[in-house]
Each structure stands twice: as structure tokens, then as C-alpha cells.
Image: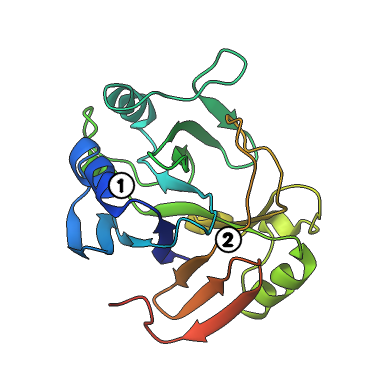
Amino acid sequence: MKITKVKLFVHDVQKMQQFYCEQLGFALVKGAEDYFTIAVGESEMTFEKISSRIQKQYHFALNIPSNLFQQAKLWAKERVSLLFSEGQDEVYFQFLKAYSCYFYDPEGNIVEFISRQEVNEKYHTTIFSIEHVLHIAEINLTTDDIPAVAKKLNEYGIKPINSNDIQQDTLNFLGNYEDGANILVGPSDRLWYFSDKKARISPICIEINETFQLIMNEKGHLTVAQGDILNR
């Protein structure tokens, strides 16, 4: 499984574009007054304006080459404030064999750099730049109907990692370990790791394998569509 495109919704398009394109340096693919799209390695991410009355909150992770985590963390520290947990600004996940660090974007979304040691590509350089981001590694689907969402994902071959059972009170990782990409399914009001923010049901659209889209509305209901509905 590959996460090829993602559409997130934002309240301030201009502020978010300045952050992602100027402060972090992601390449602008296209944009207008009410949206913009950036290249995230082999993936694309679109930020589209939504009414300020609609609350939302996202977490997503970006895959970093397996040998460039410390370089990526130093690069990030020059541009953003890294998040800390128990005095540490990084963590190692044994079940993913991966190092991660975290920071906020201007609307409080939690951005993660993740370097999976067994599956992420290795680059023959000792200097990190934003062009070294490989692709979108993780994106969350927050819902209070986890069994229904997990069942729908299973119908399209997106199954729990390591054949784990679906849990209703915690974060579930779905997708193939070897592909280095996961859909995260968890309940609302769960505190995000390395953060004081709670998960919130949010509208989102995720394209998988350039083939189909997972579309969640602001009530946490998931539908699946075929075709390229993410192109404007």
C-alpha cells in the first residue's frame, strides 16, 4: 500500500502555504486562493480551505531515508520547535523499527519525521534537505466507529499491521509493514503522542495506490470512491 495523495482542510490557506512552501521548502505543485498542493516526495498533499466553524485536527508522518534521521532532526530544529516527551525530542518504535520526531504546523497539526530502519530507502549523503522526504508514511482517520471503519478498509485490502486485532480505545496501525505506509485508525479524544492535543474527528480524503480514495466526513463516516477525485 502507498499513500499517493492526501487532502487536508485548513482555515488559513495563506499561512499554511507560507509554512510548508517557504519555511519548510516543499515544492508547490499548484494552488489558488482556496487551496494549494505540495509535492511530498513521491506523494502529494493538498490543503483546502474550510469554514472556520468546522473543527479539525490531523496527524501525518513523512518517511525519511533510513540513514538520515539525525540529519533530518537537526534540519527541522533550525526551522521549527520540536515537541518533547519526558525530556526527549525523539523516540524509537520497536514494532516499526523506526526513529521519529514531531512538530506542529500553524494550525496545530502534528507533523512527524519517521525513519524506518528496515524498509526506508538509504541515501548516499550525509546532508538532509526537504527533497529527501520519500513519501507520506502515515495519516490518521479519527472516528468513534472504529469497527465499521476498519471493516471498510479491510474490504480494500488495508488490514492491521502484523495481523493485530482491532482495538477500540487506542491507535490501530493498518497497512503492510514492508511498504512503509500506514493508515492510523483511532478514537476521538485520545491524546496524541508527544503532544497535548486530543484526536478530533476531521474531514479528510486519502488516495491509495493511485486507485481509490478514502473519504471521511466531519462526523467520522468513511466512504470509498474510485477514480481521481483529488485532482482539481
> What residue is shown at x 57% (from left), y 59% (from top)?
202
> What residue is shown at x 55% (from left), y 56% (from top)?
182
Asked whether the beta carbons under mark 1 and mark 2 sit within 8 Å of each other, the answer is no
Nearer the viewer's eye, disc 1 or disc 2?
A: 1
Callout 1: helix, strand or loop?
helix
- Distance in Å between CA atoms under marks 1 and 2: 31 Å
Question: Horizontal and vertical percent for residue 139?
Answer: 51, 55
Residue 132's place in the image compared with 166, above or below, is above
Compared across the picture, whether 215 is left or right of 163 comes to: left
Q: What residue did someone put label 2 on?
A: 176
Q: Residues within 10 Å of mark 2 (few under 14, many from 20)?
A: some
The numbered mark at residue 16 is 1
Q: Residues within 10 Å of mark 1 (few under 14, many from 20)?
A: many
> What residue is shown at x 53% (from left), y 64% (from top)?
203
Residue furthest to the top in view is 87
Question: Horizontal and vertical percent for residue 29?
Answer: 19, 62
> What residue is shown at x 70% (from left), y 48% (from top)?
171
**Quadrant of the rendered structure where residue 154 is?**
bottom right
Residue type, numbered disc 1: Met
Residue 221's place in the image compared with 127, above or below, is below
Observer-nearest of 229 and 122: 229
For marks 1 and 2, the one nearer the N-term is 1
**Quadrant of the rendered structure where residue 156 is?**
bottom right
Question: Horizontal and vertical percent for residue 138?
Answer: 50, 52
Residue type, numbered disc 2: Asn
Q: Quadrant of the C terminus?
A: bottom left
